[in-house]
């Protein structure tokens, strides 16, 4: 009876992340951080040069 109950809850279990999808997500996060850093640096340089 317990096995029947646990099999009913299989769709509710979170999907296991494979290594390839984790690497893709980490690369996407790294690129997002790089782009954010470049944009932030350019805004800071714009503010500094406009104050001169």
Image: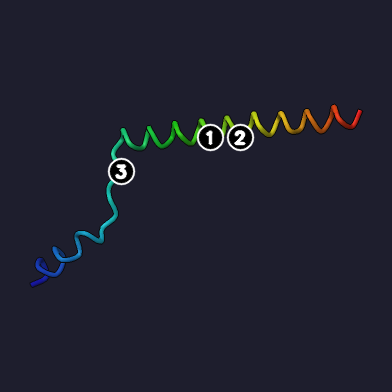
* Closer mark to the observer between disc 3 and disc 1: 1
Residue 16 drawn at (x, y percent): 27, 47
Residue 15 drawn at (x, y percent): 27, 50
- Say which quadrant the C terminus sits in: top right
Q: Which residue position holds label 3?
A: 17
Viewer-proximal residue, 23 or 32?
32
**Residue drawn at 30 percent across, 43 percent down:** 17
Mark 3 vs 1, N-terminal side = 3
Tell me if label 3 and label 2 are in contact, CB under 8 Å: no
Task: Specify the farthest residue to the right.
Answer: 52
Q: Is residue 30 left or right of residue 17?
A: right
Q: From mark 2 to mark 1, how far is it between C-alphas?
A: 6 Å
Colour scheme: rainbow
Q: From mark 3 to mark 1, how far is it between C-alphas?
A: 20 Å
Residue 7 drawn at (x, y percent): 13, 63
Label 1 neighbour load within 10 Å: few <14, some 14-19, many 20+ = few
Q: Which residue position holds label 1?
A: 32
Element assignment for label 3: loop
Label 2 neighbour load within 10 Å: few <14, some 14-19, many 20+ = few
Mark 3 vs 2, N-terminal side = 3
Q: Which disc, if any, is residue 36?
A: 2
* Closer mark to the observer between disc 3 and disc 2: 2
Tell me if label 2 and label 1 are in contact, CB under 8 Å: yes
Quarter of the figure with residue 37: top right
**Residue drawn at 20 percent across, 64 percent down:** 9
Element assignment for label 2: helix
């Amino acid at each position: 009876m317990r096995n029947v109950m646990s099999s009913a809850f299989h769709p509710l279990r979170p999907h296991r992340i494979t290594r390839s999808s984790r690497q893709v997500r980490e690369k996407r996060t790294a690129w997002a951080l790089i782009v954010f850093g470049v944009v932030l640096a350019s805004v800071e340089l714009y503010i500094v040069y406009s104050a001169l």
